[in-house]
Image (tube, rainbow, N blue to C red):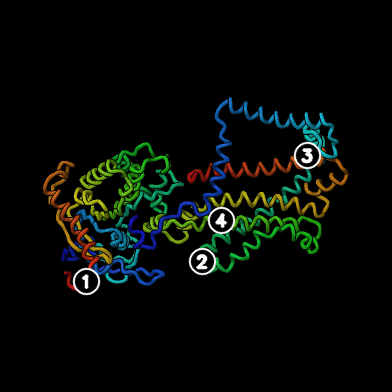
Amino acid sequence: MSAGDPRTAKLSVRDATKVYQTASGGLLALDGCSLDVRANEVVSIVGPSGCGKTTLLWSMSGLHGLTRGEILLDGQRITGPHPDIGIVFQEANLLPWRNLDANINFPFEIKGTTPDRAWINHLLHRVGLDGFGGKFPRELSGGMQQRAAIVRALSLKPSVLLMDEPFGALDSFTRDEMNRLVEEIWLDAPTTIVFITHSIEEAIFLSDRVIVLSPRPGRVAKEYVVPFARPRSFEIMATKEVFDLTNAIKLDIVGGRVARSRPVTEPVH
Amino acid sequence: MSQSDAIPEFSKPKAGEGGEVSLTNLSAFSGGMGIKSAAEIVAIILVAVAIIGGAELALRLFEVPAYIMPPPSQIAWALIDEFPLIAPHLGYTLIELLSGFAIGSIVGLILAAVITQFPFAEKIVAPYILLLVTTPMLALVPLLILRFGFGYTPRIIAVALAAGPMVMINAATGFRRVDSAKIALARSYGASTLQIFWKIRAPMALPMILVGLMIGAIFGLLTAVGAEMVGGGFGLGNRLTSYSSMIQMPQFFAVVLLLSILGILIYVLFFLIGKKWASWEA
């Protein structure tokens, strides 16, 4: 558990607890989750299915309230969606009735501000989407859609980028390509990134730190520092260090599941 | 994705909540409308000629009396000859249809938009809407005539009552297709409830709204003609009763043909609007 000073952390999660009200009663999704993300750090959050990763990310974005605890951005408590926080959603989440240009203009329409065309064109060029402005989402591949979604999120120049399993629906080659793209964008203009993923490899490739959540209710179970310098190549993914790290994280996730299936109060024979 | 079980708010948009059914119909029709090659055009014309010509030939060959079924050529000539006489009645019917449809669909759209925002109100209103949808509004025409006389008023009310619920029930289905991820996207930029409505809910509902408007317009046309047949002395429905009572069958079928053309035009109009504004869903 990173017990950083909340005054130096860019984004700080303090004792985040979330109970969902369902038909069958309260469901504890997060239970006292605390973590700090430093400025320009890339942190991935992994964990077993249903452990509350997405809940945690949505709480960080201000889209969800917490039942208990708080989220601090630059030391200020977040009470709702914040202009400094950009989100990349699962499966691109483009508006299908708008072409690519109109999709990227959407945030500016909502805010009633003028888009920074030069910056947007730079981003579109960066992700290789120039000339596609008139295309509708259904005319683009999954990878292109997600690239457009990244441009949309970065167009407002957020200081924190939250990415919610953004590449989960892509094939593994496209996913590698997208991971490289995220790294390039980060090297271009470092930002604070919190990345939710199911893929341990993806988490290691992208992050400075990987945080493992426990099975539901989600708590920070473990934290790993990824010591490799950027730009990283896919070759380092085949090294023993990465292999050991991947296995350790995998064991944490699987081990957590095994532990959960045993009675907690009685000793195991 | 796999977390959706843990987070009720994230339930994926259900693919095909009623809406897709009617849209599939639309796109199935579009497959038929997308004419590709000269060979297709020739084939379509040949079949049309065979059907119309075949009917003409058979009716003349078997000497079917014109008061039972006039041959197509006679119907076509009747339409051309009588058109100056029929045209004003076409105008009356169109006035009833357009004003009734406008009133009915505006009220229907507003009700759908408001009611879907309040699930509780929706539950209370739903049975009455269903009642309005399932009751043939023609049944009310004699009563409306008793109250409002033989002018436009009872007919316009009947058309509005026929079209409105159709528009409303389809539009409500559209407005209910909530995609929580898209609403979250808008909210993440600080969108207001009104912005979410106009920029997310309304465009998402548009394909269903168009289906509702089309069905409403067709029902409106049926009801307008039906109401005209009940009484009042003007409109295309009145022409039908008048021609049939005088056994002027070519003229009678000319009016029927005109009504079919009107119905097809309504269909094509909404099809083209849908193609222009809602093609993203197909």
Query: SS at mark 4?
Result: helix
Chain containing the residue with disc 1: A
Residue behind mark 1: A264
Residue A198 place in picture, x, y as percent: 26, 53
Seen as rendered, the residue at the extreme bottom is A265
Q: State which quarter of the image contains the N terminus of chain A.
A: bottom left
Q: CA distance from mark 3 to mark 2?
A: 48 Å
Q: Give yes or no for contact between labels 2 and 4 (Cβ–Cβ under 8 Å).
A: no
Badges 1 and 2, same chain = no
B145 lies left or right of B180: right
Q: Whole-percent x and y of residue A254?
A: 21, 58
Please indicate, yes or no, whether residue A138 appears anywhere in the rendered image: yes
Label 1: element kind: loop
For badge 3, the amino acid type reads Ala
From the viewer's perspective, is the residue at label 1 or at label 4 nearer?
Answer: 1
On the image, numbered disc 4 is attached to which residue?
Answer: B171
The numbered dot on residue B254 is 3
Q: What residue is disc 2 on? A: B119
Look at 69% across and 43% down and name the residue there. B262
Mark sitting earlier along the chain (3/2)? 2
Q: Nearer the viewer, residue B37 or B204?
A: B37
Left or right of A209: which side holds A119?
Answer: right
Q: Amino acid at mark 4?
A: Ala
Q: Residue at x 61, y 28 (%)?
A: B41
The residues bearing labels 1 and 4 have C-alpha atoms spaced at a distance of 52 Å
The reply to the same-chain question for discs 3 and 2 is yes
